Image (cartoon, rainbow, N blue to C red):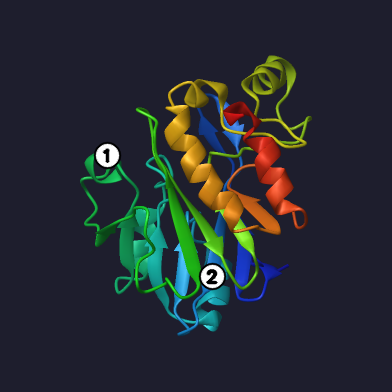
Amino acid sequence: MSALDPFGPDIWVAEGPVVSFYGFPYPTRMVLIRLSGGELFVWSPIALTRDLKIEIDALGPVAHLISPNKIHHLYMGDWKAAYPGAKLHASPGLAKRRKDLRFDGLLGDTPDPAWAADIDQVEMAGSFAMTEIVFFHRKSRTAIFADLIENFARDWFKSWKGILARLDGIVGPYGGAPREWRATFRKKTARAALARILAWEPEQVVMAHGEMTRQDGTAFIRKSFRWLA
């Protein structure tokens, strides 16, 4: 069984282990993009297994390791050790949290020249709690979210945890950002960022946690951000 699943031209997803987040079981997922120059862009790296590494090494050199927000960093050190030539790109606030890592750049509202020809990005700012960088792979028309859209199946969380997840607004069919995070946003700032994301007119949507969509991505995103209406 392959560790990498194609999600379009030059883009793959891989499923990682389930981790505990405040006692809730969270699946992990990463995205791998092959840039037009052949280098690999790794978004939210998951646990690096032997089989996953073999498949990745067959695709090209790992050049960029991306943290989309400050809570997506668990395996960054392991990947840097495995690929010492790769650059570490920190999301806002992560450098203070991971002082053990030396970052090569801070992600913001403008794509790095190394991937600007293939990938666009928007900084979803306006929250005093956390900022997330949203990416868009042009060739596959895929928008990539970490926690701004969580879209769990209704039966993923059991018992009272399932009830809390539904109240938190992170259960499908459209999911969304956790309710307590939504409350920290200045809506005017967030709406401006969302308008730029919708202008990409994505067809597919990948998120770190939950069920992805391969069609009608723009409508899916709009419904997932109904809290900004």
Which of the 4 quarters of the picture holds residue 84?
A: bottom left
Which residue: 66% across, 76% down? 9
- Asked if the residues shown at circle 2 and circle 1 are in contact, with their CB atoms under 8 angstroms apart, the answer is no
Image vertical order of residue 183 relative to residue 47, above or below? above
Viewer-nearest of labels 2 and 1?
2
Q: Which residue is mark 2?
A: 33
Q: Position of residue 220 (x, y in %)?
A: 72, 45
Which residue: 77% across, 53% down? 216
Q: Nearer the viewer, residue 89 or 217?
A: 217
**Which quarter of the image is occupied by the N terminus?**
bottom right
Q: CA distance from mark 2 to mark 1?
A: 26 Å
Labelled disc at residue 97: 1
Tell whether 218 sits left or right of 199.
right
Q: Position of residue 205 (x, y in %)?
A: 66, 53
**Which quarter of the image is occupied by the C terminus?**
top right
Q: Position of residue 161 (x, y in %)?
A: 66, 19
Which residue: 31% across, 44% down? 92
Q: Nearer the viewer, residue 73 or 16?
A: 73
Q: Callout 2, which amino acid?
A: Ile
Q: Nearer the viewer, residue 187 or 63?
A: 187
